[in-house]
Image (cartoon, rainbow, N blue to C red):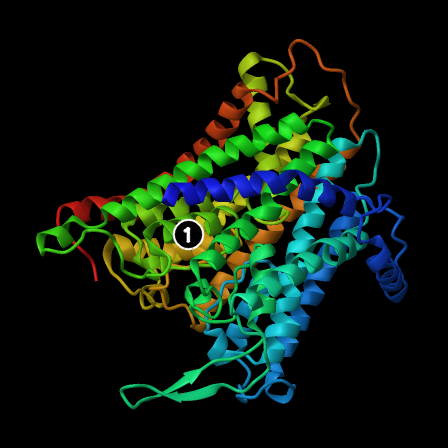
Amino acid sequence: MDWIQLFLILLSLALLIKPIGIFIAQVLDPHQKTFLDPLLKPVEKRIYKWVNVDPLIEQNWKEYLFSLLGFSLISLIFTMLILSLQYYLPLNPESFTAPSWDLNFNTASSFMTNTNWQSYGGESTLSYFSQMAALAVQNFASPAAGLAVAAALVRGIARREMKTIGNFWTDMVRITLYLLLPLSVLAASFFMATGVPQNFKPYVKAETLEGEIQTIAQGPIASQEAIKILGSNGGGFMNANSAHPYENPSPFSNYVQILLILLIPVAQIYYYGKSVGDTKHGWCVIAALGILFIIGVWACSFSETKGNPQFREIGISEHNWEGKEQRFGLFDSALFACTTTAVACGAVNCMHDSLSPIGGLIPMLNMQLSEVIFGGVGAGLYGVIIFILLAIFISGLIIGRTPEYLGKKIEAFDMKMIMLAVLPFVLVVHGLTALTCFSNWGLEGLGNQGPHGFSEMLYAFSSCSANNGSAFAGLSTNTPIYNIALAMAMLLGRFLVLAPVIALAGSFAQKKVHPPSAASFPISSLIFISLLIGVILLVGALTFVPALTMGPIIEQFDMLKGKLFS
């Protein structure tokens, strides 16, 4: 039944990929019409008038990058300001005070970079106004910015001998207005129908059977849940995230959440194939990433099923049930963990710190592969294009020919930008993890010792640098130094990648297109699928396997020998 469920999710996804991909193509071309134009076109025009933007005037790559950086800086300041003033702002029935300055900076950086790392419990820290006006707004803005950058790169590859790559402000408006907002309204309506609260009531006090007083949180949960899932954000209204019944009440809602997490990231690859005039190439990319995704799901679920053999010795099932919701079970927990880390979402329906060593390795490796196994909204698309170009370049070196992709030569400047997009992520993860291992402040936050404690630190910086946001929850990170270090990992992981990607878009837009020849690499073939899988795994293996060996791999061998860490 578990694998039938996975099959049904993939089947539903396959049926939606093409229509959503075509719609994304329409949204990202301001000259095309969509079926929502009669309703939203007047709103779009009014927004352009308010912000004084001509939607048809395009930008070169430097102007596009400057607009992105300026918008991101304003978003960061805007979010920090609301969080700082939340005690004085409306919709604060519990009278929550402002978070500390370091937590404020960490949270604002987190949501602005589409990471949604949370060093706090949402229902015990933030007001309804902060959740909606600060965090939910960024849950729309940050994925829209990522998809805008991906669209700029797609235009750069598809165009020939042009200096412009689109208009950042037009892309932001159209992505938010035509794509994210309508889908979020539909998703929020579904979640409310399944029992997810959407209200502004004060928290409820209830007396338990033991005679204790329990506080039951309320709030506008369904609206934030929708964009949290659709936008590859992941930050939950509740501290337990999608493991909480208010966010994810049933196996059916869990099924829909997994489907919605995958929806835009997979459909955007079809949009890419359509935009460059080779939909078969797009399907090949989807196939390559799908193979990696299914292998990861199998490995994680298999490890959780086998669990800890020491359980069997004391007469109980060795299945690893710790940290999992009974209403989801082992497979749904493993599937959700693999989905949310492959797609840069970061939402969780189980506690990743409680996963078995190999079960925890898979989500961590998903992030360390630069989250290109579909990846987040926008971020996954430009990430996988980077790996495609890298794979084509390697194939060109093998046959001793100048590498070409879609008729355009991959030249020295392009490779420099590709390396600048790949290497900083590796350096940030390894550098900050190493610094934490040798620092008192880093070791004081550990919930476990030995290799599992190292895994907690490695997972945290992998998650923040990859802009994922999920965590091995055993690590206590709400301290000034941890909050700053993790915020820097988020900012560096986001903008050290975005800048070279936009520069690469500008470079490709100016290139001439050469007609294909017999020596051109076939990008719609089994050879290409194998090459792309190999390059993705090779980069991950070369850069992160040594660190993984010191964490979950050693822990797995120790567990089999009967040695555990607490």
The image shows residue 108, relative to residue 265, as above or below, that is below
Closer-to-camera residue (417/350): 350
Q: How many marks?
A: 1
- Residue drawn at 45 percent across, 65 percent down: 249
- Is 462 left or right of 109, judged from the image as shown? left
- How far from the left and from the top, in percent, is residue 180? 68, 56
Q: In this rendering, is residue 280 above or below 327?
A: above
Q: Quadrant of the C terminus?
A: bottom left
Q: Could you tell me if residue 373 is visible in this image? A: no
Q: Pointer 1: residues within 10 angstroms few (<14), some, or many (20+)? A: many
Callout 1 amino acid: Ala
Q: Is residue 51 left or right of residue 158?
A: right
Q: Quadrant of residue 73?
A: bottom right
Measured from the top left, where is residue 426 in percent x and y?
48, 44
Name the residue carrying label 1: 337
In this view, 428 is above or below 213: above
Q: Nearer the viewer, residue 162 or 556?
A: 556
Q: Which secondary structure lies at badge 1?
A: helix
- Measured along the vertical axis of the image, is residue 177 above or below residue 91? above
Identify the residue at image location x=62%, y=68%: 136
Residue 174 image position (x, y, % from top left): 78, 54
Location of residue 229 by image quarter: bottom right
